[in-house]
Image (cartoon, helix red, strand yellow):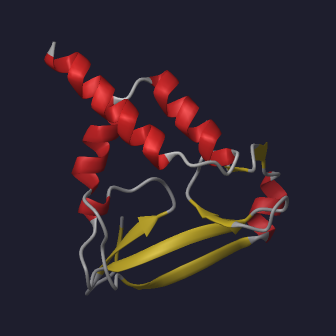
Amino acid sequence: MRASDHNPVIEIDCPVDVDDVEVGGRVRVLIQKCPHCGEWTAGPLGDDDRYFCCGEAMDPFVEAAGELEIEGEVARKAGGGADLKRMVETLTPEDRKKLRDLWMAGQDWVEEAEALLLAREAEARE
């Protein structure tokens, strides 16, 4: 987090829990344009702070050249970060990989995620 004299600014250039920001709060977001598909992504999506999109690692020079910084006020929040974190932690690494693969293939992953979550919660109760 970077703080000015009057308004703290939360920097979102890494995964951030939605519970850590408030509507009306100041945020700074760094996004990169993927040279492979043209999509914009915020924050490292892979290991070792390297950005991944389309299953491809982005070249660091391309990352810097395709970077855009946005600073402004949070207009709205959706969902609950703590609830999502709990759900994700319920899934196994294999479950998360399966869901990521479905998502990357453009397939319906939401129904599968709900089924996996119910199955893992049932296993935990046993």
Counting from the top left corner in percent of width and height, residue 39 is at 72, 67
The number of discs equals: 0
Residue 22, quarter of picture: bottom left
x and y percentages locating residue 72 in the rendered image: 43, 86
48 relative to 122, above or below: below
- In this picture, is 98 found above or below 86? above
Please give the name of the residue rendered at 14% of the width and 19% of the height, measured from the top-left corner: 125
- Quadrant of res 102: top right
Q: Is residue 33 above or below residue 103?
A: below
* Residue 123 position by quadrant: top left
Residue 7 coordinates in the image, percent (x, y): 28, 83
Residue at 39% in and 76% down: 27
- Identify the residue at image location x=54%, y=81%: 70
User: Residue 13, how many percent across, how many down?
Assistant: 51, 61
24 sits left or right of 34 in the view: left
Looking at the image, which residue sits at the far top? 126
From the viewer's perspective, is residue 7 above or below residue 35? below
Where does the C terminus fall, quadrant-wise?
top left
Farthest-out residue, left: 125
Picture quarter with the N terminus = bottom left
**Position of 108 compared to 88: left or right?**
right
Q: Is residue 48 at least partly visible in the picture? A: no
Residue found at x 54% / y 38%: 99
The answer to whether residue 98 of the structure is visible from this angle is yes
**Quick one: 116 or 94, which is closer to the camera?**
116
